[in-house]
Image (cartoon, helix red, strand yellow):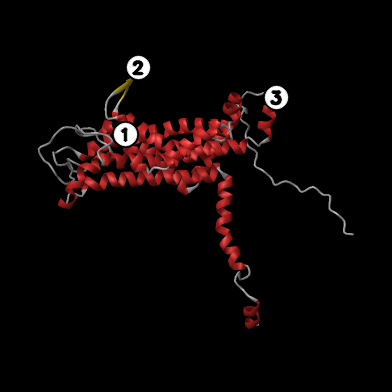
Amino acid sequence: MSAVSTSIPTPPAVEPKAPANAPASVHRADEVGLLRRLASNKLSLISLIGVVFFLLLALVGPFFSPHDPAALGDDPMAAPSGEYWMGTDSVGRDVFSRFLHGSRVSILVGFLAVVFALVVGTALGMLAGMRSGKWRDSVIMRLMDVILAFPLLVLVPVITGIIGQRDLSLGPIPIGPETLVAIAIGIVLVPVFARIARASVLAEMREDYVMAVRSFGGRSRDILLRNLLPNIAAPLVVQAAFGLAMAITVEAAVSFLGLGVQPPGASWGTLLADARQYVTLGAWWLVVFPSIAIALFVLVFNLLGDQLRDELDPRAKTAMKKKSASPRRARRGTDPVATPDRVEGER
């Protein structure tokens, strides 16, 4: 009789992670290490430089506009020159000044939409994950499925039309049309964050530290905020980078359709909408500059999302490596369609 092995297999080494209740200095060290790793990678460094550039463009760009973006000029449809760096539009307004002010509006709408979707989606997803299998979980996730069933460019105009283009106020805080557009885009992005948060909570609920806290009578609210939230933040941050690129694209599309930022306000989408009837007349400058800005913004934040996913989500990185290595293993292996007759013929 063969002997039965009683040795216990050694578990794979796991990179230690700072617990949720670790000192603030530990978390700061992790953040500094993440920034150093991102800065050491060329693509990460390019994406970080691009993010800083667009943030500065939104924050301080309008202060350097050479002309009033709404002022009518005497030289309509002028090509780019020393006086008008990006030319003028059909009524003589300086395109460069409108581009700078529109950059702030577009980027602000994108950030507000992602923040709204991140906060609401994470809260709903964590609540559904903690009540997995209960009626709350079913109601929340079925609502998310309903929202996901509609295309983005169909649902956002519908929500924008329902909310309306009017100035509202939340107590002393004014809520302009740009904020309403951001809320409409954020509602469409909520299900993505909710699904990620729910899946992450379900995975973390099986961990020993959560079971230990629950066995000692920890309240669900404390478990969610102190233990689960810090440990599920990584995939949510990654999705926020991708979501920001998506929000900018949707805002440009909605404004292009005339349902977003309204004239005389400016955004990248409204600049494209104003230029569509002059493209065939040779006024290339009306289309090229906002199009390049949208393309670069989407590229920068998609690159940032990819690099953050590699650094913050090692499981996804390992899965991608296995997926890319599987075709090579298949080519090195035996022929999956080989038959005895074929083998005999080859001999």
Q: Position of residue 256 (x, y in %)?
A: 26, 42
Task: Calculate the distance from the C-alpha at mark 1 to the C-alpha at mark 3.
Answer: 47 Å
Q: Position of residue 306 (x, y in %)?
A: 48, 46
Front one among 111 and 225: 225
Q: Return the mark for residue 160.
A: 1
User: Which label sits in the foreground, 1 or 3?
Assistant: 1
Can the viewer see residue 126? no
2 or 1: tag closer to the N-terminus: 1
Residue, disc 2:
171
In the rendered image, the residue lying farthest to the left is 74
Q: Position of residue 324 (x, y in %)?
A: 55, 57
Q: Tag 1: residue type?
A: Thr
3 or 2: tag closer to the N-terminus: 2
Front one among 72 and 327: 327
Taking 91 as reference, is 250 left or right? Answer: right
**Image quarter in which the C terminus is found:** bottom right
In the rendered image, the residue lying farthest to the top is 172
Neighbourhood count class around disc 3 (C-alpha, 10 Å): few under 14, some 14–19, many 20 upward:
few
Disc 2, SS: loop
1 or 3: tag closer to the N-terminus: 1
Q: Residue at x 60, y 37 (%)?
A: 202
Q: Tag 2: residue type?
A: Gly
